[in-house]
Amino acid sequence: MTKAELSVILSYETSRRNTHIYKSQRINEAITAPVLMLIDENGERVGEIKLADALKLSEERGLDLVEVAPQLKPPVCKLINFDKLRYEEARAERKAKSHQKTIDIKEIRMGLKISEHDISLKTDQAKRFLEKGDKVRLVIKMRGREQMFSERAYEKINNIAQNIGGVVEQTPSRMGNQISLTIRP
């Protein structure tokens, strides 16, 4: 049984050492099968053994008896240093989490009466954000009577999106007095 297979099954729920019950398996005294197939700490098959003998063997070796395949007849159990396994699992999870890249959504706001020069500055800024791997949300805010001319805002935001490039993830949508559009790299 590999550590990857065990990690799917093992999920720590309580701090009491001898009566842990995990998602689909049991530890030490929580095992109920009278006879079980035992695998030692080196991964070698010991054979079918009574539960009391397996618990005694695990106590002698200072390890935990973990039920890894309860659906089999007899269920398969393994001798493992469970605290060490939990520590290694948590460590691997932290390491995997540190290597994940988080994607930020950068928002660029502008008004409906924005000039062409300002639009070119905003598109350059959005292109830099996309090169870094971030998503960009373009927002046009309409004030007062500008809200009556929302089709102009839709045209303007679509033109800006074409100039920026990238993939339009969310089509232009209106929420109140704002029209927004999301672009991803």
Image: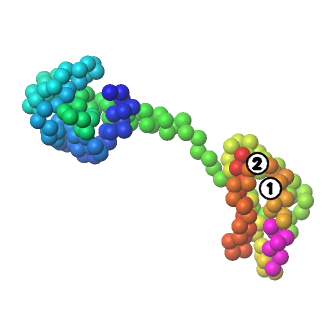
Q: Residue at x 26, y 19 (%)?
A: 44
Depth check, front residue: 55 or 105: 55
Q: Position of residue 51 (x, y in %)?
A: 12, 32
Q: Is residue 152 visible?
A: yes
Furthest residue toward front: 73
Secondary structure beneath label 1: helix
Q: Residue at x 77, y 51 (%)?
A: 126
- Answer above or below: position of 117 versus 7: below
Name the amino acid, label 1: Ala
Q: Position of residue 49 (x, y in %)?
A: 13, 26
Depth check, front residue: 93 or 75: 75
Q: Quadrant of residue 67?
A: top left
Q: Closer to the N terminus: mark 1 or mark 2? A: 1
Residue where numbered disc 2 is placed = 166
Q: Residue at x 80, y 56 (%)?
A: 161
Mark 1 → mark 2, Cα distance in angstroms: 8 Å
Secondary structure beneath label 2: loop
Q: Is residue 91 left or right of residue 148?
A: left
Q: Quadrant of residue 182?
A: bottom right
Tags 1 and 2 touching, CB below 8 Å? yes
Q: Which residues are magenta?
A: 148-154
Neighbours of disc 2 within 10 Å: few (<14), some (14-19), many (20+): some
Of helix, strand and loop, which mostly describes the magenta segment? helix
Q: Residue at x 36, y 36 (%)?
A: 7
Residue where numbered disc 1 is placed = 161
